[in-house]
Amino acid sequence: MLKFFFFIMFLIPLSFFINYWVFLSFLFIGSFLFLVKGYMVFPYSNFGFYFGEDNLSYGLILLSFWICCLMLLASSGVYKSNNFVIFFMIMNVFLLLSLILAFMSLSLFTFYLFFESSLIPTFFLVLGWGYQPERIQAGTYLLFYTLFASLPLLVAIFFLYNLTDTLNIFMFSYVSNLSLSVYFYLPLVFAFLVKMPMFIFHLWLPKAHVEAPVAGSMILAGVLLKLGGYGLFRSFGIIFCLGKSFNYMWMGIALLGGFIVSLICLCQIDLKSLIAYSSVAHMGIALAGIMTMTYWGMSGAYGLMIAHGLCSSGLFCLANISYERIGSRSMMINKGLMNIMPSMCLWWFLLSSANMAAPPTLNLLSEIGLLNSIISWSWVTIYSVALLSFFSAAYTLYLYSYTQHGKFYSSIYSCNSGYFREYLLLMLHWLPLNFIILKPDLFFIWV
């Protein structure tokens, strides 16, 4: 474990040499992909010091590396304005480090520690490199929503250790039949529901997305929302019996909330706000799949988390490309872009079709598994699932058609086409999204 830890720590001096950092990061992604997967002879690998990884964490670790590298590729505005570039790079390295250690934790307490530590560099990204004065309010929402839900989780972890004398994640299957009460179930689940986020507890997410720089939006949508789902995967080893009694509450809120958020998306005129609310709708159906506690539901939710991380991150990149040229995120001004940037219109189409789960994307494979598991759990859910799927396609079509078609605003005729860096960035989002479906077990094995 120390070799992975020190490797990332020694990347910090490379923050002074921005051009080398991106290429070395991709080199490390390749080595991680082949070497670590090669060592996984058993269902999991133990790196020592209560750190390791298994089939569940492998895909999320790889996604963290991928998105963090693409963040640096997308943040040209920080480099051009020379806005504390070195500190920006150091924040990215620390954020990557906390995410990797969170997904590699074999102890529930170390997972909690790094789960919370990822909040600090994200908070600094929003406050330090955000665009509007409202970023202070967005950072406060992000901080207090997460901390409010996390303290009961810490108390529940201490109670669990007092009861079982272990916090090892792989020992939870032996303590799943303990006579635990609802007072233990709620704090263990609540922190992860806020992080996903579930409808009702989602108010921090659109504010944080809208005010964050493109790097902050990418890492929030790409990886940080997946910490909540990953925590639910791990915690249901303990509360499996309680989940059979109480999960129906979260199922109802997640599915109906996803439908309501889809209607909210149709009312948005801010590009980033629409994409942020769509994340809540997608995480709602993933949460419903996790709450079924079936193989199909868990596998579909895991695949959707990976697919949403790539797709939503790519849409935020596209929104930022338009914002850098036009100076506004309003859809009233960002329209008719097909006349100005026809080549970028292709990428809007490809990522929008992925967002509405069109074939052959990983979103489609995951949503088929989720629909199967949720409807087989209860036939009543067919109505909310049908509405959620239909309006998910509706607001994505609204996003694409409103921005690309129509008469363009009179002052944007001078927009140029995309740069090579931007096409490379969008291609690196789209390629894994469409080619993982050919052989998913090459990159990660379903849980």
Image (spheres, rainbow, N blue to C red):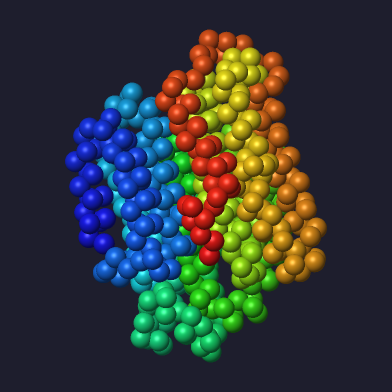
Q: Nearer the viewer, residue 290 or 214?
A: 290
Horizontally, residue 343 falls left or right of residue 114, namely right
**Residue at x 61% of width, y 43% of height:** 361
Q: Is residue 172 above or below residue 199?
A: below
Please give the count of numbered marks on the rendered protein. 0
Dividing the picture into quadrants, the one containing residue 239 is: bottom right
Location of the N terminus (image quadrant): bottom left
**Residue at x 46% of width, y 55% of height:** 59
Horizontally, residue 343 falls left or right of residue 380, namely left
User: Which x, y percent locates residue 85?
Assistant: 28, 33
Q: Is residue 119 above or below residue 235?
A: above
Does residue 224 show up?
no
**Residue at x 53% of width, y 37% of height:** 430
**Residue at x 46% of width, y 62% of height:** 55
User: Which x, y percent locates residue 291?
Assistant: 62, 68
Dividing the picture into quadrants, the one containing residue 350 is: top right
Q: Nearer the viewer, residue 53 or 39?
A: 39
Does residue 286 show up?
yes
Q: Is residue 8 above or below residue 294?
A: above
User: Which x, y percent locates residue 347?
Assistant: 58, 29
User: Which x, y percent locates residue 120?
Assistant: 34, 52
